[in-house]
Every structure is written in structure tokens, then in C-alpha cells.
Amino acid sequence: MKDSATLELTEGQQLALDQLHRIVQASHGAVAATHVAATANRPGYVEARISVGCANLPRTEGGLRLRSVEAVTLLIPPDFPFRAPSVRTRHTRFAGAPHVNWGRHLCLYRSTATEWDPADGMYGFVNRLLDWFEAAAAGELDRPGDPLHPPNALTDHTAGLLVIRRDAPVALPDRSWLGAAVLHQVNETRCDVVGWLAIEDPWPASPEQLRESAALPADAHAFLAPAVVTTKHLTFEYPLTARELVDALARDHLTPRLLLGLTGIVADHNRTLLHPGGDAPADEEDTPAAPVHLLLGTPSRGIAGDGPRQTHLVAWHLPDFADRVGRLAADTAFSGRPQLAELGDEVIQFGTEWLDRLPTRWMRIYEARPEVTVRRDHATPAAWLRGKRILVLGAGALGAPVAEMCARAGAAHLTVADQALVHPGILARQPYTDADIGHYKASVLADRLNRIDPHTTRVEALVGDITTRLSGLDLHTFDLIWDCTANRIVRARLERARRTDAAPWPHLATLMIGHHATRGLAALSPRGATGGGADVLRRTALAAHTDATHVFDDLIEDFFPTQPPTELFQPEPGCSDTTFTGSAADVTALAGQLVAGILHALAALADRRTMATLIVRMPVGPTVAQPAGPRWLTWPDDTLVTDEATGYDVRITPAALAEMRAEARRGARVRGPRVETGGTLLGVVDDATGVIFVDEATGPPPDSLLTEAYFRHGLDGVSNHLAARREATGNLSRFLGMWHTHPHTAAQPSATDRAAMTSLTLPLDDAPARALVLIAGGPGPLWRKWLATGDGPDFYAHLAARTAPAATEPPAPEVPAHLGPVTWWPGGYAIRPHRPVPVPRKGSRS
């Protein structure tokens, strides 16, 4: 290599030249270096001229015509290898080919950030260059199945910025598309394309109609811009002069006359929109009603070797004078009056000569239209939120980040409900600023979120007490409700409202954070599930308390303690609610995990109504015992029965129902198919929500009395069992009532049952004033099906109130005559009678 000794090289450039020297020595003539020098127009860069042998490269008819030796110049940056070199040819023979910019620069990397490896240095770069020449010779610079590289336009930052939000028109095979783009002026330098109007379409006659057609707010400034879409791909890079551009468009029959005429038509219509009555002031005659942006589309986007191509868009910012010339051309050249048409021809000629001297000023383009862009979150659980209607209850430490996640995911409509004000203390972890102090959280948050993507998401604030304002909302219009309040009253209100609503509610997710923001819970109640957030969290507490492995002991302490916590965190004594300790990092991390988990579940559960709780724990330092990872707990729907007297829901867990069925099946085998059986129910009555939770069912105690006409609940071992279950469940589940069966008959109380309800037949010292009476029964086919398959049975439920002393026993019923001298059977634990009730055999009638 020549001249490198006289250059002032950086350490990186010296490394590059040393590597290049070794490559030349090892290439056996395939690569030769001829010259090294400083660059004239890029200070600090060093250029190395090399020759690449291409004589042996396989060639195809569609490939580039390469010489046997191709000379190129490598431009080595001063901070090599932490910035990739670039390469250019010493000719323009490759101009117009894919991945050739500005006629000379070869594009070796689609993304240097991901494809350039500093460790590879010049070895990797030269290999990439050799691969480029090989693909060029084979005509595979755009390989089949790869996205086509769109044409380049050298943008002028002073020309403005255009964001394309609506899918672009497509030209017909035999003629170009002509019309206008609807532009929303966001600020002085940026406009968004929010619609398209073909030249043959009716155009809005007023600014209000224009905004309505583009779904813009009433205060938005909108106008039209001329737009053309060609039938053919023009070039790989757009020219820097208007003459070159006009010449290229002429090949698709888009003449200067047509371009100026279209520009004038659009300019006239913009003036009409600005002055509907046509009374524009005289001093504004030469002032454009709107900026003049000419949008040009070509069929240049798509997949190599695959079907029709999509429209690629660029925008040419024209001087204000184009408005005047265009309007004169439109008013005269296209007039039916000969004198005006002749004058118009002169205007067109003048305009054409003016265009010949005009440089092109290409605007910066940001693509946001669905047809050519892919959302960065498209393959994530957050994609479920796209286009949905979401209600977020609470705009605090959890609600605010959850609402923002929904807005960024593209929810169509977002309502944020909260009545609290921003105060100084919350700035430590909630996304508010000093300027927001004293304002409603919901309003401040809605204003901020509305600026994320106003074209996709509309956010509104609901300021007020959630427990009372919910009644004013049509909750069925939402797809998902996030309860981020950590408020027991809100949860109870939601549970009751959900229970009393005849129509299925939307999905409900209830989020909670522990006292030190080290753990989080997300309870999911899918649409149509039997339980809401309060129900699912109660199940979670039961599961934690009864787990024999003690893996949930930390959750019990944090969320479900048996005794109220004695140390409460009150950041501003005397004027603030108690809360948790935790930073913005803690809250954001927990919120992200909980939201992602719920969205995973919604996508996975589909139509299955499975209630679930996600448990997440924050990481700790490397020297501390590591917490367990995320874990799901799930529950199928309960069996629902209504107590007609109170209207309460009786929710029977699958485990309790399974125990009843197992005892009924055992009784049918041991005592005969028509002998009643029963046992104790454990659970709780929640008067606030109107729900009676049946958690467990037991079989009959040994001293129970069972006949075909009557079941009498025994007492042996009951008190000890109830005490054990109260302790095991953290006092969440206790004596609730009794159940018994009416095999092969209606699930309705008999006269004996009604008499027993008045005294609540279980004489316990701590028996409650009310107890649930639950009867399982049904006609023969239904009863037999339940025993065989688990489908059914019919249920009767009644929350009975005690009206007599608990120790009073009801009189024993008469013994059925066919039982002979046998009076009672002890709960299935004693010897069967000598003459048992016959069991119907398969095929016989019962």
C-alpha cells in the first residue's frame, strides 16, 4: 500500500490498514490495494483504494455487468472498528441498481447496528463486499423472499416532516392515480397524512367535512396536498433536480402540464376551504392557503419475486410560488374558453421553465401506515389490547403505568377513573410532575396519554368516587377492566355489581402490590366467570393458607395475614392514606410483569372461563436467597345456585361438589340408591357482595342417621374438624351449613326439612345465627347422570335463620315400614341392614 506512512492515522485506522494488508497478502490476487490517502470531503477519514477480482463470479441475465476487476474506494472512519467503513465506486455504472445510493455508494448492511461486528473488523467488511459483488453478478441483490429496499431520496431537513398514517392508493395497470392527500398539520414543521381523495371523488366542501372525513378533532388544522401514484417503478434513487424528476415522470405520462394543473386544483380547493364564501382578502391573493407538498408514489415496496408491489411514498416540498403558478394554470389552461386556454398554455410554458431551474427538496418521511410497517409489539401479549376498549380504575402507582401500557399498545379507547389529586409525595414513584400538583390525577394522566398516539387511542378521565361513578358507565362496552385501586370497598362493589348484572361482564383484572413492593398479585376473572376480583383473591388466600409446602407463606404475611398488620406506612402523617413502600423501579417492574401475565392469560384462555391468579416476586441481590419465580394458580368455574329468599349467589366449588357426589355414589353402593345422605358445608356468607361461598363439603359424621325419608346430621367429630379447618384456612372458611340429598326426587325441602330449618339442626356451641341448607336432587335420569358423569344435579339453597335454641333436637321421623325393625343407619360406617334397598341393575327400571 502506498502513502500510508505520511498520514496521521488514528489507532483504529492503523488497525484497519494492517488488517487490510493481511487480507491482500492472503487473497492471492483476488483483492489488491493500490492507494491510501486522506479524504478531501470527509475530514478525519482515510480512503483506501482496492481492486476486487470478479472474473470468476457466476453471472445471470438479470445481474449487473461487472468488469473482470472492479475498483472501489473504502472510507475508513477515525473511530474504526466502532464505526463501520463505507464503500463507493469510482464510476456510476451501477446507478439505479438496488442497494446503490447516489450512483456510487454500495449499501452492504441493512442495519449496521445489528449486522456490523467490531470484532470482525476489515475481515468481515471485505467478506461482505465480496458477497455484494457475488449477489450483484447473480442478480440477487434483492433475494427472493427478502423485502425490497425502497428508493432513496436525499432529504432536506428544512423541507419539513411527513408522517404517513393511512394506506396509500395504488395506480391502475394502465393509468396513474391522481388526487390529493389529506394532511393534518401537527406543528410548523410536521404534517400527518390521514386520508386520500381521488380526483374523481367528491371532495369535502368545508373544513368541518374535511376533519370529519379524516376523524380529526374539531380544532385540528387540515388541508390537501396534490398526490400522484405512478404505474411503474421510476428509479432506485430520486433526483436532486426538478428537471430530472419531470423527465422520469414523463415516461409514465405525467407531464408538467398535468402536475401544475393538479397542484392548482388542490390549491384552489384549499383556498375554498379557508374562505368558503370565496371572499379572500386581496392582500392574500399571492399567499398560499396551505403549504405546497407534492406527494409522489411508486410501486417500489414489497418482497423480491413476490406479486404486486405496494406504493412507496416521497414528498417534494415546493416553494410558495408553486401555489400561484398552479392556480393560474388550473384556471386558464383547462378552461373551455379559447383565449383563456391560450393564456393557460403560456402559464404552463412559464411553469415548465421554472421547474427546470428548481432543485428538489425532499421532505423527511416517517412511515406509520399498517400496510408497510409492523408494530414492534405485534408478537407480544400486548397485541391483545390493540383496538380494545379499556377501563382503568385508579391512576396511582399501579393504575398510571397500566394505563400507559394500554395506550402504547394501541387500545382504541381508554377510560381512567380516580378522584385523587396529585400531591408532592407521589412524585417519587408516580408519573406526574411538580406542575401537576393540585390537579386531578385522572385528568393529568388522560391529557398526557392522549399525546402518545392521538390517531389510534382516545383517553378520557373519569374524576370522582369510583364506587359511585361506576353506575353511570355502561361497563358492557369495555373489553377489559383493570382494578388498580387496592381498595377493598371497590372490590366489594365490583363483586356485587358483577353478580347482580344479567349480562356477562368484561374481563376483570385485579392488581395488588405488597407492603414493600417486593411481591405482586394479579387476579383474573374472565368474561362470564362465576367470580370477580374479590372472589378470586379469596381463593388465592385459601390456597396460600392450606398449601402444605409453605411456598406461599410470604404471600400470607404480605397480603392475607391472620392478624392485621401493626406497622403501617403513612408518608404524610395526619393527611394521607396508608400505603406501601417502594420506588418507581419497583412499581414499574411489578406492573409490567402483572400486565404481561394477564395479557398472556387472556390470549391463552380464549373462551375458557378459568379464574386465575398470577404471583410475581421481585429479584433480590446476588448474595440473598433467591425468591421463587412467577407462578399461576387457576380454578374452574363454580356451580351457581340462587337462594330465592335473599337473592344471594351460592357458589359451590368443584372440590365441594366432587365431595358431595363421591358421598352420594358411596351411599348408593352401601345403603341403596334412595337413601339420603349429607354432611357439613364450610365457607362463609358475604352480605356485602351477596355471595355465599361453599368451599368444602364433608360426608356424614358416624352418628348421622340416614333413611329414604330423612337425613339427620350427627355431631361426632364435627367440632374438632371445624376448628382444624378454621385454623388451616386462616379463619377464612368456617361452619356454613349442611347439605343432604333427595335421590331421584325434586331438590325441594320436605316438611321435615322445613321444620328442621327453623332450629338449624346442628347443635354446636358456636353455631352461627344463620346456616345454609343445601339440597341436591333431581328426577331419576338426571340423578343417575350426575352420579355417573358429574353433570347436574338440581340444587335447592336457603340461608336459614335460627329461631329456636341450638341444643333443641327435632323429633325423630317415623321409620318407613319396609325397613322393618331397623330404625337408623349410622352414616355408612356400621353394618348394613339385612334387607337393603335393592340397587337397580343396568337395563332395569328404577
Image (spheres, rainbow, N blue to C red):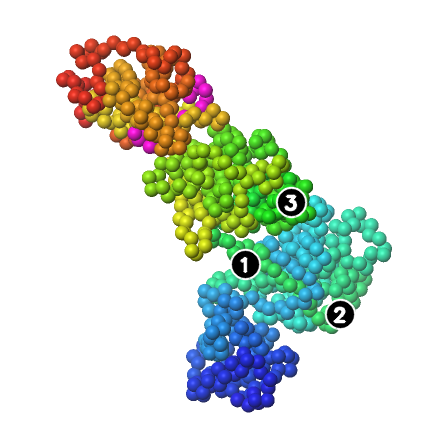
Mark 1 residue element: loop
Which residue appears at 23% of the width and 24% of the height?
667
Question: Does label 3 or label 2 sit earlier along the sequence?
Answer: 2
Residue that carries the numbered disc 1 in the rendered image: 372
In the image, residue 685 above or below residue 251: above
**Mark 3 packing: few (<14 Cα in 10 Å), some, or many (20+)?**
few
As measured in the structure, the alpha-carbon distance from the residue carrying label 2 to the one carrying label 1 is 35 Å
Residue 80 appears in the picture as rendered:
yes
Question: Does label 1 or label 3 sit earlier along the sequence?
Answer: 1
**Mark 1 packing: few (<14 Cα in 10 Å), some, or many (20+)?**
some
Which of label 2 and label 1 is nearer to you? 1
Task: Out of 264 and 511, give the one closest to the viewer.
Answer: 511
Quarter of the rendering occupied by the C terminus: top left
In the image, residue 752 above or below residue 92: above
Which residue appears at 72% of the width and 64% of the height?
318
Which residue appears at 44% of the width and 18% of the height?
645
Taking 711 as reference, is 508 left or right? right
Which residue appears at 45% of the width and 67% of the height?
144
Taking 297 as reference, is 649 left or right? left
Over which residues does the magenta segment extend? 643-659
